[in-house]
Image (cartoon, helix red, strand yellow):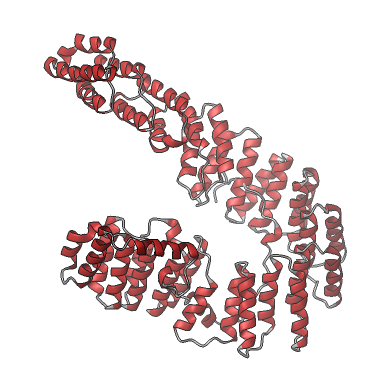
Amino acid sequence: MEISAAFLGVGQVSTPSSFPSVSLASAAAWSCRSCVRIVAAGTASPVEESGRPPPPSIRKAKLSNSRRRGSNSYSARQSAVVEVEKSADLESALQRLGGVLKVQDLNVILRSLGNQNRWRDLSLLFDWMQKQGKVSVASYSSYIKFMGKSLNPTKALEIYKGIPDESTKSNVIVCNSVLSCLVRSGKFDSSIKLFHEMKHSGLTPDAITYSAELNYRGLKMDSVMYGTLLAVCASNNRREEAESYFNQMKDEGHSPNEFHYSSLMNAYSSGGEYKKAEGLVQDMKSSGLEPNKVILTTLLKVYVRGGLFEKSRELLSQLESLGYAKDEMPYCLLMDGLSKTGRIDEARSVFEEMKAKGVRSDGYAHSIMISAFCRINHFEVAKELAKDFETRYQKYDVVILNTMLCAYCRAGAMDNVMKTMRKMDELTIAPDYNTFNILIKYFCKEKLYLLAFQTMEDMCRKGHDPGEELCSSLIFHLGKMKAHSEAFAVYKMLKYSKRTMCKALHEKILHILISGRLLKDAYVVVKDNANSISQPAIKKFANTFMKHGSINLINDVIKAVHASGYRIDQGLLETAVSRYIAEPEKKDLLINLLKWMPGQGYAVNSSTRNAILKNSHLFGRHLIAELLSKQRQLSKSVKS
């Protein structure tokens, strides 16, 4: 990691909610076989094949469709589906009939070919669908599923990686199809690796899909599989499904162990459901199991999330008496909950108590308190705690360093900021999204806007997308200091990221580009986002471009402005024509403009026409006379 003015960027500090959660996922004793089974939860069938009753809206749509089945259009499509399915020459059939087929029709044919094991025709049809842009989630899911059936995982993986739409790529049905294909082909290591990549890219695993796939594969559910499903549910805040699997497991005669209880307890912790958590502890005791450190610590987490701080203190005392509070985890849970509900003095009291008892700490308690004091603007106290951490501990990670960096930035301690950045570099700790976010905000606060811009560039190079609010603020400040190119670069970073963009930002950057005479870039903004830009802003752009923009793009700009709904006025046309007259070598552009105008209802006024006629020898007298005659006729018809 390079130490430079732009080597990092700003973000909100990671609070110790980043602490490792107490869940079954932490039970490393579970075998690799279980991991494979998690990923093996392969493809779900397409939605229409799921076997579940469709929602009312879909039932209504189907009813509506059935009423139209007598129409010629529907009959033609149905006939085309049958003919294409039965055709011995699929390519020829698609050329003749493909135009009338909709995506849902093609999906029917796709599944029919797959069920008949017609692999060559299946691939030919899917390639054709892709070229025609007639693919959906169900198309990808079905095709990849059949690739698994034909034991062609390479093709399935190639199709998956080529999906252009990110939301389709992270769709649980599509992802499960790919994973199932890999597992079916014995590519277990690849499936596990891809599973983690998918989760990182936004996949939310569907526990119900996992269960259905396990049953589909003929695997009998056992306590290990139920534990896997419980862990997945808990880590994705699927409390109701976790309860359902837990009860189903018991109904089938499997006895829950500590891992099953801890997973369900962790599911309750996200919502602070303390009554259910207490009931679970009683159920555990009645089954002959004593709550262990993991269960009790998770119960503490439930109490904290539920705002039951007195019960939390009592349970912390119990953990201490049992010898389960020798490290900082339970104290951190309580401190974090207290500080986030505004009870900062109580949180600090727990912190001091923990230090007095000599509880083993890796510095996360310091991290929590530093963040807490930053939240209430006690920056000097936060800075002193950060310094105290540096003298006590030699173990650092990105979360703790971000916390310290945030404290120093909020306190305006530039020397400490640079020292922390150097420490990250020395320890080869890679900055994360929060690191960049913290620094960019700090540089903006110090009015070091170019430094903030360079940091944001580095942020994007490292694969982190900056947030809209941060980008919008930096764009404004860069524009104000006349760093127009840099402002546009930030705009593009946001536009081409996975973040959402406020429509007002298009107009904001347009004004900055006009001010900086970056008119080609301004043209692109108008062309791509005209619906989000006001008419006065478009008029301002058009006037500026006609006077100062590239002459080669004048016609394109006029057409783009017209397409936006803005009516081209005579002033713009007169300016454009005068520029063409000044550069006779651009006569083809003038001719093209004059040819285009009548079709859109435009005609030059008398003064512009006279200027053109006066210089017609430069452009071809006969052609000019013919074009202007057509415009004159248009003007007369409009007036009449």
Between 405 and 149, the one nearer to me in the picture: 149
Give the left or right position of residue 12, taking residue 132 as reference: right
Between 89 and 17, the one nearer to me in the picture: 89
How many circles with numbers are drawn on the protein?
0
Q: Which residue is most to the bottom?
A: 253
Question: Image quarter for residue 314?
Answer: bottom right
Question: Image quarter for residue 626?
Answer: top left
**Residue 560 spot, x, y in % from top left:** 34, 31
Residue 141, can we see it? yes
Q: Which residue is most to the left?
A: 622
**Residue 19 spot, x, y in % from top left:** 69, 63
Residue drawn at the location 37% of the way across and 73% of the way down: 145
Give the left or right position of residue 346, taking residue 220 as reference: right
Instruction: Relative to 422, say whether 510 is above or below.
Output: above
Give the left or right position of residue 624, taking residue 508 as reference: left
Question: Image quarter for residue 144?
Answer: bottom left
**Residue 89 spot, x, y in % from top left:** 15, 69
Check the picture and name the quadrant holding the C terminus. Answer: top left
Between 593 and 451, the one nearer to me in the picture: 593
Between 167 and 386, the one nearer to me in the picture: 167
Residue 22, can we see it? no
